[in-house]
Amino acid sequence: MSNLQVSSVTKSYGAKKLFEDVSVNFTPGKRYGLTGPNGAGKSTFMKILAGDLQPDTGGSVSRPEKTSVLRQDQFGYEDVRVLDVVMRGAKKLWAAMAEKEALLALPEITDEQGSHLGELEMIIGEEDGYVAESNAGALLVGLGIPTSAHDGLMRELPGGLKLRVLLAQALFGKPQVLLLDEPTNNLDLDSIRWLEGFLCNYEGVLITISHDRHFLNAICTHIADIDYNTIILYTGGYDDMVEAKSQVRSRIEAENADRSKKIAQLQDFVARFGAGTRASQVQSRKKQIEKLQVTALKRSNIERPYIQILVKKPSGKQTLTIEGLTKRWPEVTICENFSTLVTKGEKVAIVGGNGVGKTTLCRLLAGELAPDAGKIEWGKDVSIGYIAQDHGDAIAKNTTIDDWLHSHDTNAYLQDIRGLLGKMLFKGEEGQKSTEVLSGGETVRMMFARLMLTQPNVLVLDEPTNHLDLESIVALGEALVKYEGTAFVVTHDRNLIETFANHMFIFEPGGGLIDFRGSYEDYLAQKDAAVPAKKKTR
């Protein structure tokens, strides 16, 4: 059995029901994106699929033996060789290899142990054990981990690379089912492109949760959407699901409107002739009314914020001038002699691998760091709205959401602040919630509420999509397109980049900061076109 079968699964937490009586058959060769807003139950459903969480009484999940799950315990293998961590993803192979090694370490072995050793060799051969290290190494390289790190210990890797090793572990060993929760976290754009290609060639059952819209569109053959307390399957990628979902709802609404109109006409007839001589006709109309039931539309659990960042006062035309900018850390040169001009209204995406200096560049732009050489000159009347990647220190403790926002504009009325918070999905009296108990998503939405309140003419946003669901990321992309100021945004979200950016700062592998005027698609086309030319010169 290579299908993953879900039968009559229900899961509730207290009075909140996430999904009810769900039955789904996930089949090989199909790649499913598991979608739904924050709090809908995506991670809960994924844990049920993985066997880490049990459904409520009566439900069951049947899964193949070789089911692989992306784990997030980045500190669980600190004293283990990186290649060995990857190979542990093939549990049967790893167990056979470990047992073989233990037998061979014995001073002598019995005939029975010798026979068992032969059985282990067969298992190792069947599981591609003799090329396991090279296969594991290829996965690591594809995910951006250099060969120099493969024989080292996990403790020697930074956190972001440890998570990549765990992703390689999940991919290793040709699993029948792959369960990947946010596999693009901590991946740069090149690694995401590699992963997309790998998964598109995967022949088993793939189920993934991702807030990366481009990734879902690129790899998914189906979307399993958690909404209306159930799971509905749609054919195609994320955008296909959104369109199909909208069409279904629009069709039902149109049918309901026609039925309501017809019911009103029949009720008018009944009211006019109910007491007269046309009793048979009246009864006939009553029966028609009973049959013309309006389809009840369940309330969707999807909630979308409304992000609209206005500009209080426009900046000068020449918004930013950089001349000869140089910044170095002991372990890496961020940029050297970098110069550019950014004019009012340009939307700049800052992209590159992990650890190359994107956050450092944001801090330079925000004035938190000084360059080693060169200058950063902001134009006339520039006001900067900055969201740092690590924004914990930006939010005061021992205060409320209302008071924190009011501190950034003491002239703002409470109703205006509450209005902004409502647009960012803070309901009722949630403005009185303490800033110390906010979730990651709430914190980010509060930071955007601050931008909407202060109305800066320049945005510097470092990984603003962290902790946001897909609906919120779409809302952010639309807001950036409509924003009349100038924006600098660090992100690995391909769809977001393609939505808003018309100017690129690109950190290239091996060093160097490129100033590219155009879209990311233009950059990739230029980059891909240059590859054959390079090969010819070798």
Image: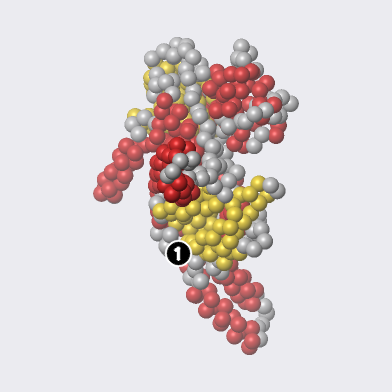
**Viewer-nearest residue: 153 or 487:** 487
Tell me the SS state at disc 1. Answer: loop
Q: Residue 104 at what x, y percent from top left? A: 62, 76
308 displayed left or right of 43: left
Above or below 349: residue 130? below
Q: Residue 36 at what x, y percent from top left? A: 53, 46
Above or below 452: residue 85? below
**Viewer-nearest residue: 466 or 331:** 466
Name the amino acid type tagged 1: Pro
Q: Mark 1 points at which residue?
A: 28
Residue occupying the point 45% across, 64% down: 28
- Image quarter of residue 251: top left
Please identify the residue farthest to the front as the structure is shown. Answer: 277
Residue occupying the point 56% across, 20% down: 453
Above or below 388: residue 101? below
Q: How crowded is mark 1: few (under 14 residues within 10 Å), some or many (20 or more)?
A: some
Residue occupying the point 61% across, 34% down: 442
